[in-house]
Image (tube, rainbow, N blue to C red):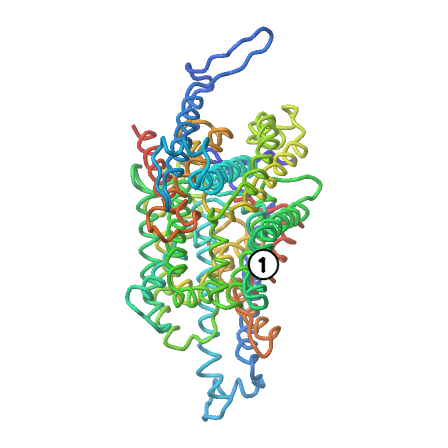
Amino acid sequence: MSTTTAVARPPSPGGTRTVRGRRLLVLAALFGILAVAAVLSIAIGAKPVPLADVWHGLASPSGTENDIIVRSLRVPRTAIGVMAGIALGVAGALMQGHTRNPLADPGLLGVTQGAAFAMVLSIIAFGVTGLHAYIWFGLAGALTASVGVFALGMVGGRGGPTPVALALAGTAVSSFLYALTSALVLMDEQAMDVFRFWQAGSIAARGADTAWQVLPFIAAGLVLALVNAPALNALSLGEDVARALGQNVTLTRTVGVAAVTLLSGASVAACGALSFLGLMVPHLARPLSGPDHRWLLPYSGLMGACALLLADVAGRVVARPGELEVGVVLALAGAPFFVALVRRRKPVRL
Amino acid sequence: MTPPLPRPGRAVPPTATAAPVRPPHERPLRVGPVSWLIRLRPAAVALVLLAAVTLLMALTMRIGDIPLTVPEVFRAITGDGPEHFVVMELRLPRALTGALVGAALALAGAITQAIARNPLASPDILGVTTGASVAVVAAIVAAGSTAGGPSGALAEVGIPLLALVGGLAGALTVYLLAWRRGLDGYRLVLVGIGVTAVFTNVKYWLLTLGDVNDSSRAMVWISGSLNGRGWEHVYPTALALAVLVPLALLGTRSLGALRFGDDTVTGLGVRTNLARGLMILAAVLLAAVATASAGPISFVALAAPQIALRLTGAAQPPLVVSALTGAVLTAAADLLARTVFSPVELPVGVVTAVLGAPYLIYLLVRARKEARS
């Protein structure tokens, strides 16, 4: 294990006070961008809603057509986008911190493929139809797969799993489940039809019940993630140093993995395979926050939510009157940005 | 210059670093002025794997609509008649394609993991397999709605050619975007992630556009399939391996050095950019040819080097043993793909992961147990 941490930039000459002030300012700016993105997400769509009507629908609905669009379609969709974006951003940062691998995405614990497999299985074996039911199965599959990965990473060793063991076990389990899912959808056309749309990743046509369905999991995951942040800082000094500082390494790893599982499992089950967001956003947030996870996690979460909402809005605009799946927009718009960023500066290493 | 930072995701698992620098079972072989270091364990592992791949191919020859015994297979090779056709035109090219493609993918994976110094890296990150997938899925989806499905010329020549072009274009994109006054392994990986994400999501999107039948057909190709592969798939792959394997082996020394930080490597007298560029080119060509022949067979490139690493106890994925492991994995997977749900054939790529993943996990667990005791 390494005993050096990467520092984004030398501490500014003004001392800690200005650093903290700057960080709070960035945080406030991110909240501002998120608010704008949320309003855009409510206002823009197949039927544009004027800003006055958005306010009317939110504050004092009186049952007009725009009120119904705002309250039954756009608000739940936006809420799910915000939740999934925060969840994936935070989960990605946690995952990269724990595995200390820039390739790690929240799907690495097997949640994406676990959810996919469980959903496809539920369609083929139990004849399940309807989004609400798929999501429960997806959630169960995601949680089971990630517990399995964690257990496999632990077997044979003492204490918590090492990052390399966890990453490899996760990749192995994901590939295994993806293979089974492919075999199943190749044999069943109806499952293939559901699977291909889920795979593209979308937050469209999700109602308020879906938002309430995933909220408890994401809330619990966020609490665990924030609790985990200070310990993760110590852990990034290397396991031995962390242990010497009085850290319970196994406990830290377990809490971290539990948080990633809850966050990414819930968002993947609800919105499909969007794990690229979780991979990309921490790389964008790290230059702003530095290596301190207490700041990286909130930055990453807020940036994730902004990116998801703005991508979703763009997907509604570019393909009028239809829509482009948010997963596709995220990759098409986000990846070039990500590549440009990687090229422009020396990447902040983990 | 900043000192090279120790990197987290190196190809060396913590358990493997404990090996002494010169274990007692290594002895130099001297022939006149030439001396060669023979490592006994990798050599033994390689021989066992070679035997295994031969055995698996022999088994593949026997199985199918016309079951043959081993003596019958041999008689069929020399004689003529329906058995001769079945063995020489159907089963042998298929088995050879499988083994060669597996070897090529594994070799590409070993090189990529060594350069990226990351056990999660695979040629997918170089943009090859995903680039090929996008090209082929687009063709299948587009042709499906107009010409009633890809058949004849498109299936036989068009798809491999498209895959090759798509794969090379994908790799070129990654390479050009990652190049900036030199080629940093870390930047290559990050750029690769970004480009791959675009290709993957475009592929997912294309899958949602067409008829569900075309999506299924595209899905078979992107899973990697050896169904109906003939000599026209064997020759290009064999040719590519014949050229690229010696090239890759010549680069082993540089590859071994590249595992240290750039400054150290330069100090050791390796021209880092040249060495890295050539090795990446070799990996790209290997992966592109393999993908053109059989589709992007999943997991072989990622798992085979890691399995080989743990079988030999080496410090980084050994090239020859990785290639042989890939051949064994693919040959075994194809055997299973043909027999388990017979008469329905699964794409071989579906089985490689089902077969390789548990084995990789078993090796991981065993390595941890050994490290403990």
Whether B4 is drawn above or below A225: the answer is above
Whether B323 is drawn above or below A331: the answer is above
Percent coordinates x, y for residue A35 in the rendering: 54, 73
Can residue A230 be seen? no
**Amino acid type, mark 1:** Arg
- For label 1, the SS is helix
> Farthest residue in the top direction?
B32
How dense is the environment of label 1, judged by Cα within 10 Å: few (below 14), some, or many (20 and up)? some
Percent coordinates x, y for residue A317 in the rendering: 60, 75
For the C terminus of chain B, give its image quadrant.
top left
The answer to which quarter of the image holds residue A168 is top left
Percent coordinates x, y for residue B136 in the rendering: 57, 56
B212 to the left or right of B275: left
Q: Nearer the viewer, residue A182 or A256?
A: A182
Percent coordinates x, y for residue B32 in the rendering: 58, 6
> Farthest residue in the front direction?
B81
The chain to which mark 1 is attached is A
Q: Which residue is mark 1?
A: A22
A273 to the left or right of A15: left
A123 to the left or right of A14: left
For the N terminus of chain B, give its image quadrant.
top right
Q: Nearer the viewer, residue A96 or A311?
A: A311
Whether B115 is drawn above or below B211: the answer is above
Q: Nearer the viewer, residue A196 or A41?
A: A196
